[in-house]
Amino acid sequence: MKTEQAARGRQATALAIIGLLFFVFGFVTWLNGSLIPFLKVVCQLTTFEALLVTFAFYIAYAVMALPMALILARTGYRRGMALGLLVMAGGALLHIPAALSQRYGLFLAGLFTLGTGLTILQAASNPYIVLLGPVESAARRISLMGIVNKGAGVAVPLLFSALVLGKLGDPAALARSAVTAADRAALAQRLVAPYAVMAVVLLGLVLLIARAPLPEVQPATPDHPEATGGLLAHPRLWLGACALFAYVGVEVLAGDTIGLFGAALGLAGFARLTAYTMAAMVLGYVLGIALIPRLVPQRAALIGCGLAGLALTLGVLATSPASTALSHALWGWAGVPELPDPVACLALLGLANALVWPTVWPLAIDGLGRHTARGAALLIMAITGGALVPLAYGWLARGGAQQAYWLALPCYGLILAYALAWPALRRPR
């Protein structure tokens, strides 16, 4: 009994520490949603150029995932997490000379470095969470991590507005007004202190992970019967990677372009709009913890996410920016500022997106055994959907910001197709 209690205590401690890392994921990742419209003003960018922020950040997952997997195989999960944090600290520090010089290329280099650190951190922490307990409840554990992650996403836009934008007034008016070179320099320098603090925090977390009592976890043994064949022999894995590519694309689309969409509609406080999307995701994660797997199987939750994503995307495309009826009905009674209906539908995509990552991961790595580390690297590479889908949106948005969101329809269709086809995707024998 005492041994079982001690094991539960170690697991709870490990979850708390990994939860802290997921907060870091969320803070660094969802800062981009506020950074994009800010840098559009500071560096005088087009919408397409501003969305290179997401491209530089997420393309690191494609470029660095396999090299980081090789490093992870040598370091193990624990030291790999510490290494990822160290690289991220270097990326945060690169933002300081970028802000002082207002060189967009340096900002992109810093974002790529942050993405590189997150690559190894994600490759280590996600399979760690899956393997920390029964696979049937993995989605519940990942949902718990998601609450922390997206909770950071709710806080980041508010902190960014308070610490960086300060008392500048209406950010939408700032974007529309003529800003002098001196004003842009002053704005850029407001980024120095936040990124310096971020670097210090990341270095502190390196020390925490190095000394933390994290239990070792292992995938199935090499002679496990389900571990036969190469990665291409596991359709649940590589088709799961395709589903994750589509998912991360629409997740970033909903979180990082909502500010640009709000600015295009002339909304006040557009830098804070990402908080709506993240709040919807937090609600989705809470539902996942409450329902999975006791009431709703992981695959059924994924089917629901695909259907909800399709319905809400149609809402973005079909509703009028002149109406706020949807947000008035859903949260206007609570005093939360209302949004135009298409912006509200875009924010609610966070609810549809919430359980895709937690459900696809356990479904995709099911039965990989000795291939789990390489399979995790493939799934991490799928995060590049966050680089390409928003960039494609930026190109399409030249013909209209609202109608360009049709791009999300095939993405949610792919997610739904994977969930429906999963039972027929047999493991190799």
Image (tube, rainbow, N blue to C red):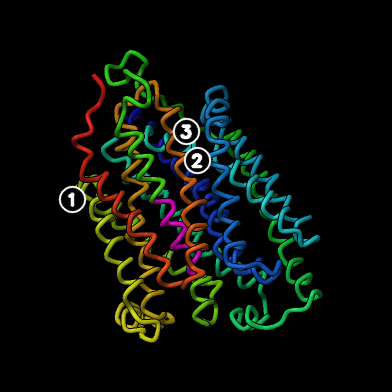
- Expressed as whole percent of the image width and height from the top left, the position of residue 94 reads 73, 50
Chain part drawn in magenta: 247-258
* Occupied quadrant, residue 7: top left
Q: Is residue 400 magenta?
A: no
Residue type at the position of mark 1: Leu
User: Disc 3, disc 2: CB below 8 Å?
Assistant: no
- Of 123 and 202, the residue lying toward us: 123
User: Disc 1, disc 2: CB below 8 Å?
Assistant: no
Q: Above or below — where is 395 with respect to 178?
A: above
Residue shown at 40% from the left, 70% from the top = 403
Under circle 1, the secondary element is loop
Q: Distance between the residues labelled 1 and 2?
A: 28 Å
- Of 247 and 34, the residue lying toward us: 247
Under circle 3, the secondary element is helix
- Which residue is identified by label 3? 377
- Which residue is identified by label 2? 122
